[in-house]
Amino acid sequence: MNLGALKRLGFRGRTLVASVPYLWLVLFFLIPFVIVLKISFSDAQIAMPPYKPLFEWIGDKMVHIKLNFGNYAFLIEDNLYWKAYLNSIYVAGVSTLLCLLIGYPMAYAIARSSTSTRNVLLLLVILPFWTSFLLRVYAWIGLLKNNGLINNALMAIGVIDQPIQMLQTDFAVYVGIVYSYLPFMILPLYANLEKMDLTLLEAAADLGSRPWEAFLKVTLPLSLPGVIAGCLLVFIPAVGEFVIPALLGDPGMLMIGKVLWTEFFNNRDWPVASAVAIALLLFLVIPIMFFQRAQDAESGGGLHR
Amino acid sequence: MATSPRDTQLKFEPWNEPGAQPYVQIDRVSKKFGDFVAVDDVSLNIYKKEIFCLLGASGCGKTTLLRMMAGFERPTSGRIFIDGVDMSTLPPYERPVNMMFQSYALFPHMTVEQNVAFGLKQDRIARAEIAKRVADMLELVKLGQFAKRKPHQLSGGQRQRVALARALVKKPKLLLLDEPLAALDKKLREHTQFELINIQETLGVTFIVVTHDQEEAMTLSSRIGVMNHGEIVQVGTPTDIYEYPNSRFVAEFIGSVNMFEGKLVEDEPSYVRIEADDLERPIYVDHGVSSAPGATVWAAIRPEKVLMSREQPAGADNWTRATVQDIAYMGDLSVYLLRLPSGRIVRLTQPNVYRHADERITWDEQVFLHWDPTSPVVVTK
């Protein structure tokens, strides 16, 4: 088909290019989401698939739709889920804060270093991605366990004479999350800090700001979009994190990702598991979307020059 | 009737007053970046309420010199005094100096008002006074109704005025302006030049302006310091710099000029005669030159001081034959390019006084060029 024919059909190159990511999202996000949503309204049964269909044909003229809100009611009744949600949010929140406290100075240092060092430092931030995420979390077991590298080293130099219990504690979970997600904090912050106009800092100094005042009044507020982006990139996956608490954490630690796993694979209760996932989405993603929209409206593009 | 600001400007010549104390003293300042000497042993005295322009091509060290006054760079050697206080070791935030940046460097996350108030808040001034001073300053730069806007909602000219207000609101002893008008279009630039002079005269702040634009330097400044390769080559009023350049560099840098290399053949206290290779007749200059007979000198004649006629001028000196090679009509004046018998091209400008001029000299015409004995400037370097 030639280009003119495409145009007559209302296709433009631009629309075509823009539709690719939308198509991707529809295929791999929207459709699975609708499937999960559908399962969350059904009843569990011991069969393949392990849930009852929502639509039942009565004869061939009528369709019988059965929506089961019991799964959601169950989430509210059983405080296990509430506790798991709150604990996940707490752990993710603390991890995000730690990532920010560690990542901001790192991103700042990288952004302000000379061009040649900058590339080396950025490479070092990205380098862990060459190894599988799972392997890196496993490696932390070797470091943190009672006869692991850290305890052995500390005992060898005589700082401690009993190994410290680090593995299967909340501490290990924080170490794992902060370690794994730190690059996601550093990269957006770096991208933001790197493009900052440094004459703004000179202007602040010229108007009487000491370096730390200039940082608080100019650099920090201007880097807020980077801070928000970094925090969301760490917080959202950290809330649903399953691997790290499962491998490094206390088996009794309540995390919503682990609850989800248990419902799916141990209890084989797909409808409740789906309801847990949908609730997670509602509690987290939607407030964040509104927050971002409010942010955009407030700045009004004011952060672009 | 009150005297206009320009009248007081004309009488304002503190550098000629014996015993006048310079307000800014730059004392043998040098700045090296590695092997590169950006500023080379510069000494300058600048007086209170002056608008002093540092003029030079890019890379001549003028911005580095300005940044040393602001405190962003430390001199490699030498000292800078402002109002008698040695600034050499003071960081920028402790200097009684403010700067207007070429890019304006407005804080994009703050409103106009907050930008202007920034420096006052740093000084822990009472809130009511800050509000008053900010409002007054915005009034002065005619931005009162834009106080709540953010910089990205302003035009280039408005941003420039915010930058000026922000730098002036702290009542600095010295305001440094880095290419203040470079980002504005030509019409706005002309208008803003005069506005800048008015504001400077209202507030009485000493201005040091860095610019590569000679026209800007000429209109704004009380005095100009011409810089080249990190050195100050000449300091003087705009008239001094234009009419009495001290070197070929200055003569050629400011405006355009016809430069004739020649030998000094007669050297008297009251006149000199120069034989230039490109001219058939000697150049006669009605004042003495401090150079030995036989020395190579250069006579510089400005295009508007070269005259043109169809009749051969009387006298033996200061004229030559020429052929019109090209004419550029600029509206207010016409630029003629004329070829001398030696092949040398001479530039001449003539104001277009009459709308109809049938007798105007035109292409390929044979003419005579001549000039007044007061017109050539003789430089020896």
Image (cartoon, coloured by chain):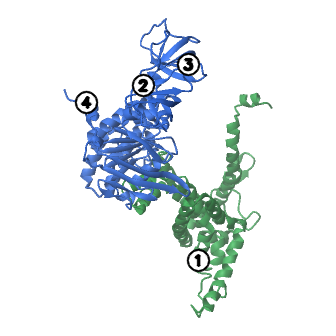
Chain colours: A green, B blue
Disc nearer the start of the sequence (3/2): 3
Q: Is residue B306 above or below residue A87?
A: above
Instruction: Tell me which amino acid carries mark 1.
Output: Met
Which residue corresponds to the image point at 47% horizontal and 41% vertical from the top-left? B56
Q: Residue furthest right?
A: A1
Disc 3 vs disc 4: which is toward the camera?
A: 3
Q: CB of mark 2 within 8 Å of CB of mark 4? A: no
Q: Position of residue A251 (x, y in %)?
A: 62, 79
Q: CB of mark 3 within 8 Å of CB of mark 4? A: no
* Residue on which the image places disc 4: B4
Is the residue marked by circle 2 packed among few (<14), some (14-19), or many (20+) residues within 10 Å? some
Please give the count of numbered marks on the rendered protein: 4
Residue under disc 1 on the same chain as residue under disc 2: no
Disc 3 vs disc 2: which is toward the camera?
A: 2
* Residue on which the image places disc 1: A253
Q: Please tell me which residue lies in front, A105 or B292.
A: B292
User: Element under label 4?
Assistant: loop
Is the residue marked by circle 3 packed among few (<14), some (14-19), or many (20+) residues within 10 Å? many
Q: How far separated are the C-alphas under marks 3 and 2? A: 18 Å
